[in-house]
Image (cartoon, rainbow, N blue to C red):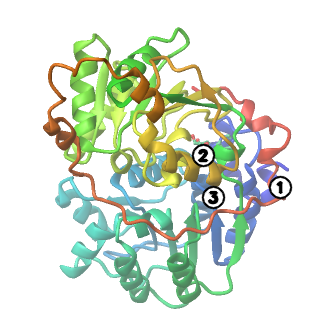
Amino acid sequence: MTFADIGLSDQLLAAVNDSGYDEPTPIQRAAIPSVLMGKDLIGIAQTGTGKTAAFVLPMLDILHHGRSRARMPRSLILEPTRELAMQVAENFEKYGKYQKLSMALLIGGVQMGDQVKALEKGVDVLIATPGRLMDLFGRGKILLTGCELLVIDEADRMLDMGFIPDIEEICSKLPKSRQTLLFSATMPPVIKKLADKFLNDPKRVEVARPATANVNIEQRLVEVRPDKKKDALRDILREEDLKNCIVFANRKTTVRELTTSLKRSGFAVGQIQGDMDQSARIAEFDRFKTNEINVLIASDVAARGLDVKGVSHVVNFDVPWQPDDYVHRIGRTGRAGMKGIAYTLGTRADGEAIERIEKLIGHKIPRVGAKVEAEPQAEEKKAAKPAREPKAAKPASKRAAVAPTDEPAQAPLERTPVVEDISNDWNGPMPSFLSVSAG
Ligand code: AMP
């Protein structure tokens, strides 16, 4: 099936062609015709599946007819983070280059003035994070009564970030007759309830998690002692075939520490974490995109949705607390047909978290020879105990130094693992679009 077969206009076909895509991905094939027909949609898919284009492309065609009015956006896309919102905006520019649609981006951390000016002129598409949108709505700068199309993207992440009450409020301000598209990687009960309440007879489209199905990502688990994690990381970063690497840590403090430590070791390294303002994050991300630095240390929330083509390696310096985050993290590599390697550094204390991840992805992560000596088993520890007591015990403060969590803690959530849809051939023979070389 080609893009022409799914009913897109010639202008969009030209833009898609310019992007170098040969054929639609499974989520695009399943979603685009329904969206073009005006149906509500639940898309169970995550980044890496081509889901952004699955809603941006038909929206561009739907909005092509009609005119925007001051302060009344014609469509609204809700994104959980600024980074994701910016990426969707980039997608609009890329696919909408042969059309004259106006867009505004409403995200925290950047000056509000220009955003308000754009809104006052009237926009076809408003891309927003819920917090900033509610803020402007409260000040009477936006009217949502003309908004006929709503996209709630990454709904499960919205839930993690506590945005569901905001989304419910936003939904209640839009016209009832609107078209609503909801995308989520998983369908926890709260999201299902949200969908039941605000979507009208939606078509449900489900595609496999790219991380579980993506044969292009080679996963490796390195069992290592906690005090040897930095050494193990340095070893990985010195691998011959490492072009660039995103390193994930669970805490902002670890992100900062690692950045300093790797810089000292001579790596070209940058960081993205929640304490940095938006412009600093963008600048850092740009340095990574343009290869000024080839190692980017990131926390989950700050790195959400980062889309850089051709990331050769991902390293989980810490095993993520949420199994879903593992899937999100490793999905930064192995994109658009390229091979990727995802390392996870696991200590004995991570045993349970690793089990949960393996349960979710449905297979064991291959253990690779520990670069740095793995933690001895309890019995071995006993046997290895020196005859004399060591000089001094490690100060207790060493552990305390990393214990506080400064990234918003994510409450453990009840999640319904995604059942892979057999209709998704992403899992089968390699679709030809996967072989498009990434730029
Ligand atoms: P997303 O799932 O929206 O984050 O998209 C993941 C990546 O796939 C992005 O880099 C897109 O540019 C790319 N992409 C989207 N649609 C296609 C397609 N039909 N063929 C090849 N690559 C695509």
Q: Which quarter of the rendered picture does the C terminus lie within?
A: top right
Residue at the (36%, 85%) spot, across then down: 169
Q: Quadrant of ligand 1?
A: top right
- Which of the pair 86/14 is nearer the observer? 86
Distance from label 1 to label 2 (Cα)? Answer: 22 Å
Q: Which mark is residue 48?
A: 2
Disc 2 Cβ-to-ligand 1 distance below 8 Å: yes
Residue at the (54%, 24%) spot, across then down: 312
Q: Is residue 224 visible?
A: no
User: Disc 1 designates what residue?
Assistant: 5
- Which of the pair 33/280 is nearer the observer? 280
Query: Pointers 3 and 2 in contact (CB under 8 A)?
Result: no
- Which of the pair 36/306 is nearer the observer? 306
In the displayed structure image, the side of residue 308 where residue 133 appears, left or right: left
User: Disc 3 designates what residue?
Assistant: 45
Which is more N-terminal, label 2 or label 1? 1
Which is more N-terminal, label 1 or label 3? 1
Distance from label 3 to label 2 (Cα)? Answer: 9 Å
Disc 3 Cβ-to-ligand 1 distance below 8 Å: yes
Residue type, mark 3 in image: Ala
Residue type, mark 1 in image: Asp
* Residue 307 position in % (x across, y down): 48, 40
Q: Is residue 144 visible?
A: yes
* Residue 225 position in % (x across, y down): 40, 28
* Residue 52 position in % (x across, y down): 57, 54
* Residue 105 position in % (x across, y down): 34, 58
